[in-house]
Image (cartoon, rainbow, N blue to C red):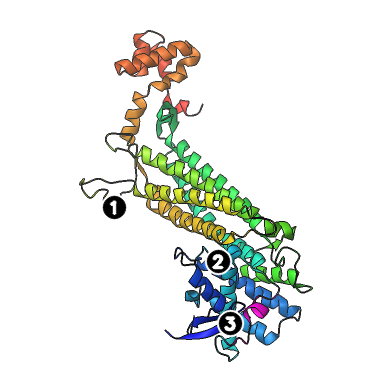
Amino acid sequence: MTYRKEKDSLGIVKVPTDAYYGAQTQRAINNYQISGIKFPFSFIKAQTIIKKSASIANMKDKRLDSKKGNAIIRASDEIIKGNLKNQFILDVYQSGAGVSQNMNINEVLANRATQILGGRKGNYIVNPNDHVNMSQSTNDTIHTAIHIASTEGLDGLIDELHNLRKTFDKKSKQFSKIVKSGRTHLQDAVPMTLGQEFSGYSKAIEKNIMNLRKAYFSLLELNIGATAIGTGINTGKNYKKNVITEINKITKKQFRHSENYFEGTAFLNEELELSSALKILAVDLLKISDDLRLLSSGPNTSIGELILPAMQPGSSIMPGKVNPVMPEMLDMICFQVIGNDTTVTFACKGELQLNVFMPVVAYNLLFSMEILTNGIKSFNQKCVSGINVNEKRIKQNLEKNAIVVTALSPYIGYAKAAEVAKKAYQENKTIMEVVLEMKLMNEKKLKQILDYKKMTNG
């Protein structure tokens, strides 16, 4: 490998000749060999949108030379389209606030813009700090990039949640006439329809969509223009207005300024709100996927009421075994998201005028949304949409359920109903058999009361 020499405020740095990044990025590469985990392209794209918008705003303020500004814009457009992805290789565990990450995008754009103007990489016609980073700071651009990338991530996640909710609605209608035994404390409870059970899943997903939309609205507030600590030092007269306008043109969203730039720079409440919403979603998805695992368990030696699609052999030693692999996959995703929320919670603390832990916040939020989006899509398509029912088993379980005696309590009293249930369990008889044996009610009235379908309607 051949190298060129670049200089920053600390001295000379050797940078690979072919690299579009420069001295500060190279120092970060040398310093942060930590995990090999890099920012997703959605975050790089968000950074680039900011740099392009800032260049346009600076040219409108006549602070940035139009030739240099247009070269930055052209270079930005190339990266937004997906070019030069291999130039963004910094570890997410890096310098506080993401200074290195901000300089990575500044240097790549500066070198590409320099090429566009006929120069060579490293001989900056367009300077990373003076031109690409004009009117900006790491402290407002990284924070703003988190918001832009997160709204993009939420677009996809909310779409998949809508699809999952529609599938649960479809299953709820399909199973509306199937009466089954309810269960509380993992024990038998009063009857319900399988459709009612699935309608609960649908409503839970709907509520999570609402939570995420609230977080989405909060993320539309940007601290861009705050620069270092909120004062807006080194920005042009119309910069704050124009940079938001340009970001909205590119993203086709309705971002707005922070109501208070000092709060917007020192706190990460919007990120915390999003992380909390993702955690709530993860907990609800855990409940749903584990319900499906329990209801399909056995299938011959346990509940076995649902039949999940068989996706792959379930054992390397037990022939014919099939496991609920898609719910298991979703469970593991949810565990990760809950752990990510813990990381984000601590990282959102910050001190004084700045939160310096933004890189790990950005990564964990975007990672959570990515795996939830992909996991929900697979879970929906390869599990929920193909669920079938073992109606014979459902009927058998319901007929054995002594808790249907609850419907008799208004007629024979709680204590006598409990006695009936106990006798039914001990003698392995149905409630109807026991009530008739004990001569507590005539058969005609008993059948009217023990109408399972009517019980599901209150």
Q: CA distance from mark 2 to mark 1?
A: 35 Å
Q: Residues in magenta?
A: 123-134
Residue wearing tag 2 = 43
Q: Which residue is mark 3?
A: 7
Q: Position of residue 365 (x, y in %)?
A: 54, 57
Q: CA distance from mark 1 to mark 3?
A: 56 Å
Residue identified by numbered label 1: 312
The image shows residue 274, relative to residue 132, as above or below, that is above
| Residue 301 visible, this orientation | yes
Label 3 vs 2, first from the N-terminus: 3
Q: Residue furthest front?
A: 11
Horizontal arrangement in the rendering, residue 224 relative to residue 107 (left or right): right
Contact (Cβ within 8 Å) of mark 2 with mark 1 = no
Name the residue type under label 2: Phe
Where 403 sits versus 107, above or below? above
In the rendered view, tell whether residue 111 sits above or below residue 27: below
Confirm whether residue 89 shows in the render: no
Tell me the mark number nearer the camera, choosing from 3 and 2: 3
User: Which three-letter amino acid code belongs to the residue tagged 3?
Assistant: Lys
Between 167 and 264, which is closer to the camera in this rendering? 264
Crowd tier of the residue under label 2, counting other residues whose Cα lies within 10 Å: few below 14, some 14–19, many 20 or above = many
Q: Amino acid at mark 1?
A: Gln
